[in-house]
Image (spheres, rainbow, N blue to C red):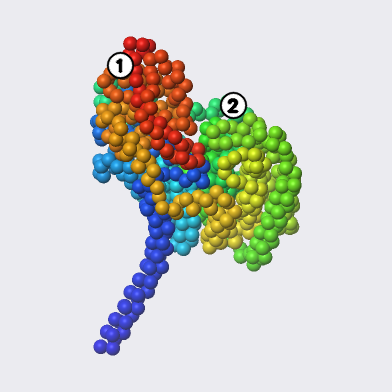
Amino acid sequence: MSQIRHHLIEARSSSVQRLARHLRACLPFLAFLLLWGIPRIGWITCDGGVPAMWEYGYFVTDEGYYLDGGKEKLLYGDFVDLTRTEAFTYGFSPGTHWLAYLALSCFGLSDWAFRIPFILLGGLAWCALYVFVAKKTSPLSALLICGTLSLTPMLLAYERTASNDALIGALAVLAYVAAALGKTWRSIVLAAAIGASIVLVKPSVFVLLPLIAAGVLSRPKLKAWYLDLALFVLGSAGFLFLFRLGVHLSVAGEAAAQGVSAHELIRRTTTHYPLPKLTDIAGLLKGLSAFPRTPSNTMLGPWVIGLVVLPLSLLLKGLREAVAHRRFHPRLLLYLMIPAYVAAMSVMNTLYTHYFIPVLYFIPVLLVEAMDDLREDAEKPDKFAPVRTVGWVLLAAGICAIACSLLSAHVPPPQDVQSFYSKIYNMPKQNVWFFTWKRILVIFLPIAAGYMLIRWKVWRAQSLVVFLVSALGCTAICFSMLPAVYLAPYLRGEPAIGMGLVCLVLFMGLVLLYGIHAAPTLMSNHRVASLFIVVFFVSYTLGSPNWQQAFDELFTKGTHVQRTVVKDLAARIPKDAVVIGERSNQLFLAYPIKTATTFPCNSDPIPIVKELRKSSPDTPLFALIDSQHAYCMQHYDKAKSWCRLVPVTQARLPSFATGAPSDVHLCRIIVNDAAMPD
């Protein structure tokens, strides 16, 4: 009996220990789910947008642009009606319209059902990120790294809505994790399928697939790395073909009914901003020199360092080692493609900060791979690492203090700065490096001297070159914000950015660079890396008025302005009417009212008016005109001899730029068919 009792006690003790281990593993994950879910799910029915984050225009129109095809299919049987040019983005982003149709089929017509597939896929991607980081480090480190990044104001704002950039980021992360953690050929095929599905949302698939390929190469090999890569490439090509074929088949019937081919229908609904010319080298360099443009410089915050400086430094370091040892590591592809994606977005003339969301999701992946990389450099214990750490942190702080005082003491007149200032809507008139190179050089010299001091008697020429190029890139990116800083007193309503914030980001970059190149033993520790992420995030939040205001707005009770306004507007519109306007499909997304969207690049409603009068002359036509974006008025003025506007009512809705209240007019369109030109 005593032996039986002893075995029972041991079994009970073992069970308690196992339960404790499971709890230690599960509690951080549950905490992460709460940290991610509560700030998002609680606002799923509310108006999108955070005025402090400046790019409010997305929340005024873009959900309607990329979701209205689902409503069209549910109510009228077709994704696209070419007469009304609705949904005019179907050829560009059919996947978002499919998701909208799926959501509406499940939950019915409402102003929140559209967002459910996006938030579910986003949550799945964050869980995959957490699992990836936890397997490579620890559950607590995964909580700190993923939880901190998930609280970034821009990510919070966009993930509460149906954002296609957040969607492709989620798909890319899911594909990467499936490839990196999988152990069979099926996981490679799954990664190829998920990665290729990005083509249904954005053409960015061709920049993101190499990122996913880095995950394929980082996994334990089935037989040989080139066979894994070949399977992924062939699988991606096959799925890309199947997805594009599916897009054509999805509209083949409705295209034939409208008298065009499926290819023509897709071509006419493929709308995007003009792409840069690759032969315009000067223009491309201006775009690169201006990164991050206003307001990206405040919206991206400390993650500017993670998107460019960290991967580029690790890439240069890895290339040096690859040449020395004649061994290519898959991480180099990851280090290359993240800044390559940033560069591809930066050279666009019309650029929005949410274009960078897909690679923001890869910062935890980048940190984990960087820790593994540095761990290989730190084979021998370094007992002087803590001492050197204090030294290089103080050195970085001293350099940044000098930079702040020098740059603040010599403020150029505004007329000397204007041609170097740029916003997301346009390139600078001149290359920003022409303005910053002297300032970069002044700060660059003490940075180089500091490295040689820290690495006294042990630095090598190749290592020095790698560090100097990395530091040059870090300084250039931070100082690209200087035109915005110097012009801030003369610009009303612009996002607040000061010299202190620029130097804070520079300090973060230097701390990382000195740590990577001078103390790899310390920087390879996941506890230290997690702490750095939290400290950087908190420091930037305390230093940035925009981030503080954003958090105030994000955690305030959500509003339902659009729901209230559209209820009144819808009551004034006949059921068989068509409402023409830039934000018409966004406003009436939850109502069985036909809309016709005018794209901002053109905003010409007259061709739509003519087509509708010819095809259905009895249909009542209405115009929705935004006082801030009244580009359509020039076209109505030209056609006033046969097309006039009769005001019906006026509403106050968030404006495109800042979200401040703006007048929106609903007008009846009266057409004189006899005078209407062909």
Question: Which tag, 2 or 1, sits closer to the chain's start?
Answer: 2
Callout 2: helix, strand or loop? loop
Callout 1: helix, strand or loop? helix
- The reply to whether residue 176 is in sight is no
How many marks the image carries: the answer is 2
Question: Which dot marks residue 614?
Answer: 1
Quickly name the residue at label 2.
280
Comparing 282 with 575, the one in front is 575
Residue depicted at 34% across the width and 28% down the height: 579
The residue under label 2 is which amino acid type? Asp
Viewed as shown, does residue 377 lie left or right of 595?
Answer: right
Residue depicted at 47% across the width and 46% down the height: 50
Residue 432: image x %, image y %?
65, 36
- The reply to whether residue 76 is in sight is yes
Viewed as shown, does residue 480 lie left or right of 265?
Answer: right
The residue under label 1 is which amino acid type? Lys
Is the residue marked by circle 2 packed among few (<14), some (14-19), or many (20+) residues within 10 Å?
A: few
